[in-house]
Amino acid sequence: MVTVIARFKMQPGKEDEALAAVKKMATEVEANEPGALAYVMHRGQVDPLEIYVYEVYADQAAFDAHRRIPHMDAMQANFAQLMDRTSFNADLLERVAGFIRPPA
């Protein structure tokens, strides 16, 4: 499995557009990427401009495919217009314990 945690900030005043873009991205990933086991975006409660992304892929091939898929290009185009590029941070993680429960 490949796990990613990413964080970035929306540009002030562009929150509605930015949230619509990340929701569209999540919908596209769910519909088109069977190797994406989790793709969840959260809005910060301390700083509501922050977006946190939790991603889990079945394997390296699924993660690599995610980075090449057309809807990723659309998100990156929107990113420059709606997000603070200097705030972007992403980490690849190694799972040491825990689980992902399938929906009931």
Image (cartoon, rainbow, N blue to C red):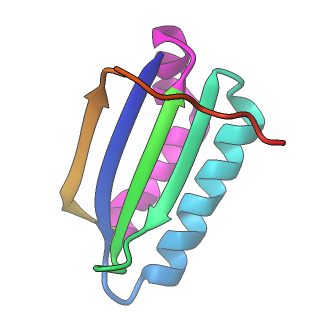
Q: Which residue is at the front of the view, 97 or 12?
A: 97
User: Magenta span covers which residues?
Assistant: 57-82
Relative placement, left or right, of 54 versus 91 is right
Q: Which residue occupies 48% across, 15% down?
A: 1
Q: Position of residue 34 (x, y in %)?
A: 71, 24
Q: Residue at x 33, y 61 (%)?
A: 80
Q: Is residue 74 magenta?
A: yes
Q: Residue 78 colored magenta?
A: yes
Q: Is 18 placed above or below 102 here? A: below
User: Which residue is at the far right?
Assistant: 104
**Which quadrant of the figure has residue 96?**
top left
Main secondary structure along the magenta-highlighted residues: helix
Count of numbered circles in the view: 0
Image x and y of residue 66, in percent: 53, 27
Q: Is residue 36 above or below residue 9?
A: above
Furthest residue in direction bottom, as rendered: 13
Say above or below: 44 vs 67: below
Residue under the image location 33 percent in, 47 percent down: 6
In the rendered view, does 3 fall on the left or right side of 9? right
Considering the image in quadrants, where does the C terminus appear?
Answer: top right
Please give left or right for residue 2 compared with residue 70 in the image. left
Residue 63 position, x and y percent, is 48, 21
- In the image as oriented, which residue stretches furthest toward the left? 86
Instruction: Tell which residue pokes out farthest to the front in this image.
Output: 97
Q: Is residue 91 left or right of residue 69?
A: left
Q: Residue at x 31, y 85 (%)?
A: 12
